[in-house]
Amino acid sequence: MDQLRPFIGGNWKMNLHLDQARDLARALIENLQQLHHADVVICPAFPYLAQVGVIIAESTIRLGAQDFYHQSNGAFTGEVSLSMLADVGADVVLVGHSERRHVLGESDATVNEKVLAALDADFDVILCVGETGEQRAQNHTEKIICGQLLRGLANVSPEQLSHVTIAYEPVWAIGTGNTATPNDAQNAHQLLRHTLKDQIAQGNAAPAVRIQYGGSVKPDNAVELIACEDVDGFLVGGASLNVDDFSQIVKATVS
Ligand code: 13P
């Protein structure tokens, strides 16, 4: 298959305060301005989306949100809707991040509601899947990640897939420094791609869905991971908080 255009996400999680978020956004624009061969999205915490959005508005860096609520408005105290995110310039959302699944208790059904709502609202979706260390030790990786993929994408049409990116984020690799080996990442990505093609696109020409790897991606492992045939980019946590590290990771995908 032809190489897909790399897509790199910076998931800032619940980190950085306003000044730091603004400085990081400005520095990224500076560092990545000559870069035209990759798509980049940054996902600040909710309170700073608007201000970071203003800073990156004229750049090629896109604004993403880490979460949202699938209903459009109403009595949902503490929640944020997609139209509110659109108001501040976001057009990408993360769905089903492992911290939302495992810390905040999101189910596959909730993940699916969010995927459908986001696609309906013309957002691009990054759907995260990944097995825990325990599930991996029990050889359940394939069952877990394919199950999360299929339940997360239930009732998504083959056409809508062009607005979906999958992030394979093995939970045991997130924030631990234990990156998946290129071989492990490639095997998981290939499985996800085949599953997408066979079960969601139902054998039709599947739109080119990009599959990001996430879990302790750093400048020194990005090169070998992106060399894998089915790794089309990264979803980066810790290293996305450092302008040099994140810029190097982005540049590794296009060199
Ligand atoms: P780390 O890069 O810190 O392991 O986090 C990965 C992640 O969860 C990105 O969404």
Image (cartoon, rainbow, N blue to C red):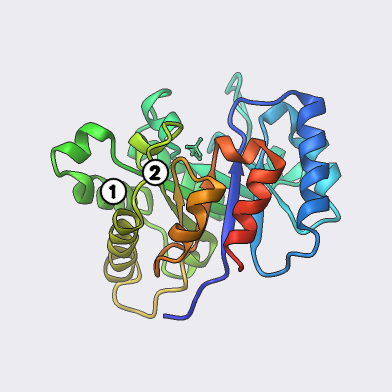
Residue displayed at 41% across by 40% down: 111
Q: Position of residue 13 (x, y in %)?
A: 58, 31
Where is residue 249 shown, x and y percent of the image? 60, 53
Residue 173 visible in the displayed image = yes
Q: Which residue is painted at 32% across and 60% down in the image?
A: 192
- Quadrant of the rendered image containing residue 171: top left
Please give the residue where the numbered disc 1 appears in the rendered image: 145
Residue 211 appears in view: no
Residue closer to the observer: 242 or 92: 242
- Decide: is 231 above or below 74: below
Q: Amino acid at mark 1?
A: Ile
Q: Going from the N terminus, do you reach mark 2 or mark 1 first?
A: 1
Q: Kindly state the secondary structure of the residue where label 2 is placed.
A: loop
| Residue ID at (29%, 54%) | 184
Question: x and y percent of residue 20 in the render?
Answer: 77, 29
Quarter placement of the N terminus: bottom left
Q: Which residue is mark 2?
A: 179
